[in-house]
Image: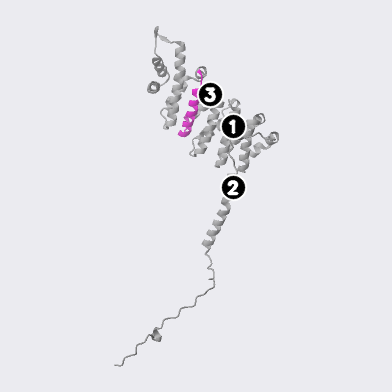
């Protein structure tokens, strides 16, 4: 059999294919799908909007009361104050709230005639979801209370002050920490600026609020009022009434309310003990111990079970 010569050449049928020449030019762009184009456009819009929002938020300054300065033209500024407070432009409303603070601190005589309307608008602003408006309006409340505390309380149950007080209790019971802190500052300013007896009468209904957090904040405010009462004013409000309020709050779900109730009991006992010593009460010609007098007082004004709980609180504090 004849043999084929051996060489390195492959048969033509099996010859390797030649590589295609490389194209050095840039490839033609592949058109994007509609979904990709839409996504990119959304990103561009978002990127252009975000800086504007940040700039707007940063334009609002939270100025401390000590850093506020008097207005250069208060007589002119007061004319548009209510309209600016009611503005739909929240940045303008924030500026108006700071002007309210300046009027309260430096030009109070100009603010008094429209104070009721100002408080009604602040109540409206406190319902806004904007954090900047909430914080600034609460700061305004603090300055208003410190300047006008002596003339805020009215006998009218539907006054602007009553509505504002409820809103402060609601804000103090919110989950947002900075809102709670500012609302509590406003309540503390209110407590320090108003006589305890009229304020206690206004707060009394709030300790039975259906919202347990509002109830707890009201209990704290009431306990602070009670701690400021003197003997005559506490008797005027009613020592048994305070004990009855405290006895109910001692069973509250929140520890904040229960602690406030214990504080009320101790405040009542402090006045009661001083009064008992001054009167030198005696029974059948023999001296009666203060503990016995206190227990008798509690039992005569509270249900038996509640009276024992209240008596025990005082004995534990000794």
Report the Cα–Cα distance between label 1 and label 3. 19 Å
Q: Give the residue at mark 2.
A: 55
The chief SS type of the magenta part is helix
Q: Give the magenta range.
A: 207-230
Q: Give the residue at mark 3.
A: 196
The extreme left residue here reads: 1
Q: Quadrant of residue 103?
A: top right
Q: Residue at x 45, y 19 (%)?
A: 270
Report the Cα–Cα distance between label 2 and label 3. 44 Å
- In depth, the one of 107 and 198 nearer the eye is 107
Mark 1 residue element: helix
Mark 2 residue element: helix
Rendered location of residue 127, percent (x, y): 55, 39
Q: Earlier in the sequence, mark 1 or mark 2?
A: 2
Q: Residue at x 65, y 29 (%)?
A: 108
Give neighbour class at mark 1: few <14, some 14-19, many 20+ (Cα, 10 Å).
many
Residue 177 showing in the rendered view? yes
Rendered location of residue 292, percent (x, y): 39, 15
Q: Is residue 120 above or below residue 292?
A: below
Q: Earlier in the sequence, mark 2 or mark 3?
A: 2
Rendered location of residue 199, percent (x, y): 54, 25
Question: Which label lies toward us, 2 or 3?
Answer: 2
Residue 211 showing in the rendered view? no
User: Is residue 218 covered in magenta?
Assistant: yes
Report the Cα–Cα distance between label 1 and label 2. 27 Å
Q: Give the residue at mark 1.
A: 143
Q: Is residue 15 above or below residue 268?
A: below
């Amino acid at each position: 059999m004849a043999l084929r010569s051996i060489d390195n050449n492959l048969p033509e049928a099996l010859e390797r294919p030649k590589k295609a020449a490389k194209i050095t030019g840039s490839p033609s762009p592949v058109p994007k799908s509609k979904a990709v184009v839409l996504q990119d456009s959304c990103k561009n819009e978002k990127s252009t909007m975000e800086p504007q929002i940040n700039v707007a938020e940063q334009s609002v300054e939270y100025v401390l009361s000590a850093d506020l300065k008097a207005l250069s033209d208060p007589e002119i500024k007061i004319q548009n104050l209510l309209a600016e407070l009611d503005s739909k432009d929240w940045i303008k409303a924030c500026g108006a709230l700071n002007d309210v603070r300046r009027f309260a601190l430096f030009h109070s005589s100009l603010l008094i005639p429209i104070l009721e309307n100002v408080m009604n608008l602040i109540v409206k602003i406190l319902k806004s979801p904007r954090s900047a408006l909430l914080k600034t309006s609460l700061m305004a409340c603090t300055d208003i209370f410190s300047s006008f505390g002596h003339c805020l309380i009215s006998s009218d149950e539907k006054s602007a002050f009553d509505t504002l007080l409820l809103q402060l209790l609601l804000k103090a019971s919110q989950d947002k920490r900075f809102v709670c802190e500012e609302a509590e500052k406003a309540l503390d300013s209110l407590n320090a600026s108003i006589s305890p007896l009229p304020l206690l009468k206004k707060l009394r209904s709030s300790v039975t609020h259906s919202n347990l957090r509002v109830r707890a904040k009201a209990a704290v405010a009431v306990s602070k009022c009670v701690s400021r009462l003197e003997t005559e004013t506490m008797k005027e409000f009613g020592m048994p009434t305070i004990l009855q309020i405290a006895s109910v709050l001692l069973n509250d779900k929140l520890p904040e309310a229960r602690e406030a109730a214990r504080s009320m009991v101790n405040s009542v006992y402090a006045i009661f003990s001083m009064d008992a010593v001054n009167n030198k009460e005696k029974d059948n010609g023999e001296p009666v111990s203060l503990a016995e007098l206190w227990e008798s007082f509690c039992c005569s004004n509270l249900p038996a079970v509640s009276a024992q709980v209240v008596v025990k609180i005082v004995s534990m504090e000794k």
